[in-house]
Image (spheres, rainbow, N blue to C red):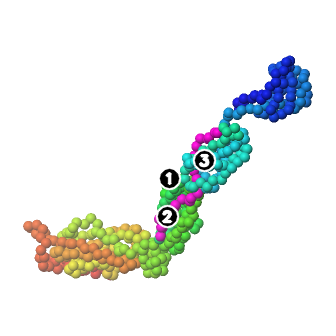
Amino acid sequence: MNKIMFIVFVLFLIGGFSIVDAASTAICRVPSYEGICCSTILSDYVWPSGNGICCGGMPFYGDVFCPWIDFDAPLITVVSPLNSSYVDSFMWFNVTLDETGDWCGYSLDGESNVSIVGFGMIWNTQVLVPDGQHNVSFSCNDTSGNMNTTDNIYFIVDTTPPQVSVVPVGVVPSHSNVTFDVTCFDETTACNVTTINVGSYFCSINHTIESSCEISLIPECEFTNYDYFLNSTDILGNFNDTINGTMNVKNNDGCACVVSNDCFSSACIGASFCGISTPPILSFLDIDAIMQISLGDIRTMYLKLSNPHSIAETVELNIYGDPTIISYWTYFQDQKYGNRTHKIVSLNPGEEIYVPVNIFGAKSGKYNIIIIGTSLSNGLKTRKELPVLVYYQTNEGLNSQTPGLGVFGLLMIVLFASFIGKERL
């Protein structure tokens, strides 16, 4: 510090100087002003002397006290708060000085100064600060009345947990991936991580880059309830663990069941297993809008049969006709015994097969072949119709009118009936 030191009272005597302090009776006689030999200063106030020989061999005693004037403001060091974030509203405002202070105060968010309790060089007080972004500055006086003020210090107080919500999960199938969609909001800072615990499963969401996570249920078949719990934190560590829910896991297709409520999206078929209640899928392969057969010919068409289920399926196929007579001339190609218009087909999950069907053009005319597929697991049916034109060729060209059986027609029917009879033997 810059000090102006001066001697309160100086007696000039012939042959030397006498230095007298206004607050002390200590006297040191010296032969000249420049001869003051006690040049090491103990403090701002005291020059050391004491009983001994000094100042050109002249005896002296005591200390010489020198008054001074202070023009420098105190140096303020802010201990707290710092440019940081805090999770406690009760904060210590704490400063230290490099010299004895007479008064210190703080200004929070630009408001008027509030005095701080302190003594000497340490000054502090506890302040209740609400959540949010804040700034504070400190001012202090020393004992000479010099004042100093700090720059603003910016800090954040956040004591409130984040606000969290999750889309209810509800009912999910066994052996599936379950997604949790979470919304997180923090008014003061920002959301950090949400952890979701579901029994022995868990997943985490980093809210800086994502808003959902998923778990993978392991068992193929499962009918149970899981409670799930969320723990969400903001970037300061405030946490919200009040959000929870329940999800219901039901058996997937193909799993054992007793009632349909045991199954996720299908019925409990035969009080045995879960399956989708849909009929078999039937279609004709590469057939025009109407199938044409020359009188006396046999033509093969292919029936496409599909199992849409994730479990094995058994389908019953039956051939009918309109008029009925066409059904007598239509049969499953590989059906060697029994009713040749009736067939039982077994299909693996998702399997497709092609079933050949033969049609004999025994009599010219227009017909409809009808094939009905019935699921033996759920009883649902699918009906497909195929228009058929049996024609005969004349000198003038194609003719579809019924000419009557005649000798040729009768012979063809007899031969066909004989062929059918042999196949059944």
Q: Amino acid at mark 1?
A: Ile
In this figure, which residue is indicated by the disc labeled 1? 209
Label 2 – label 3 distance at C-alpha? 46 Å
Residue 398, quarter of picture = bottom left
User: Upstream in the sequence, badge 1 or badge 3?
Assistant: 3
Image quadrant occupied by the N terminus: top right
Label 1 – label 3 distance at C-alpha? 43 Å
**Residue toward you, 282 or 58:** 58
Which portion, as a residue range, is magenta?
Answer: 147-170
Position of 416 relative to 190 (above/below): below
Q: Residue at x 48, y 67 (%)?
A: 169
Q: Residue at x 87, y 24 (%)?
A: 29
> In the rendered image, is residue 160 in sight?
yes
In this figure, which residue is indicated by the disc labeled 3? 113
Check residue 166 in the rendering and tell me which mark sits there, or answer none. Answer: 2
User: Upstream in the sequence, badge 2 or badge 1?
Assistant: 2
Label 2 – label 1 distance at C-alpha? 17 Å
Q: Does the magenta portion include 156?
A: yes
Position of 84 relative to 324 (above/below): above
